[in-house]
Amino acid sequence: MSEDRLRIDKWLWCARFYRSRDLARAACESGILRLNGHRVEKAGREVRPGDILTVPQRGTVVAVRVLAGARRRGPAKEAAQLFEIVADHSPT
């Protein structure tokens, strides 16, 4: 698997959406995430640059575009370069 294609659980952990890889895996398997509009049910599903990922975060739903894969989990500044926010749907 190349650096641009990663398991979704690893990418979510590297991008700092979850504090641990185990929490990212559990979120994937729970079905609360969407990848390109399709429900994610397996942590081993691959993400690639250009994919749109919908992630619940602190009472909101955030849609992000994957910009890059990651070799490691780095500091927050590095993690922010892995994605761009496409939409933030806060409850009204």
Image (cartoon, rainbow, N blue to C red):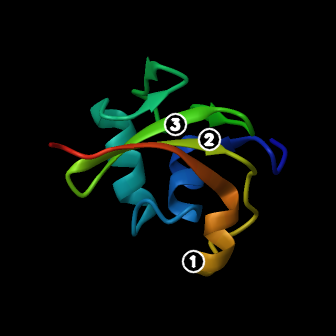
Which residue is under mark 3? 53
Nearer to us in this view, 43 or 79? 79
Mark 1 secondary-structure assignment: helix
Q: Quadrant of the C terminus?
A: top left
- Expressed as whole percent of the image width and height from the top left, the position of residue 24 reads 41, 52
* Image quadrant in which the N terminus is located: top right
Q: Are marks 2 and 1 in contact (CB under 8 Å)?
A: no
Res. 72 image quadrant: bottom right
User: Disc 2 or 3, which lies upstream in sequence?
Assistant: 3
Residue 18 lies left or right of residue 48; in this view the side is left
- x then y, percent, for residue 40: 43, 27
Residue visible at 59% across and 63% down in the picture: 14
Q: Earlier in the sequence, mark 1 or mark 3?
A: 3
Amino acid at circle 2: Arg
Identity of the residue furthest to the bottom in this view: 75
Q: Residue furthest left?
A: 92
Residue pointed to by mark 2? 65
Q: Nearer the viewer, residue 47 or 61?
A: 61
Type of the residue with mark 3: Leu
Q: Residues within 10 Å of mark 2 (few under 14, many from 20)?
A: many
Residue placed under numbered mark 1 in the picture: 76
Up-down: is 74 above or below 44?
below
Distance in Å between CA atoms under marks 2 and 1: 17 Å
Q: Are marks 2 and 3 in contact (CB under 8 Å)?
A: yes
The residue carrying pointer 1 sits among few (fewer than 14), some (14 to 19) or many (20 or more) residues within 10 Å by Cα, namely few
Amino acid of disc 1 = Ala
The answer to the question of whether label 1 and label 3 lie on touching residues, with beta carbons closer than 8 A, is: no
Residue 61 is left or right of residue 50, and the answer is left
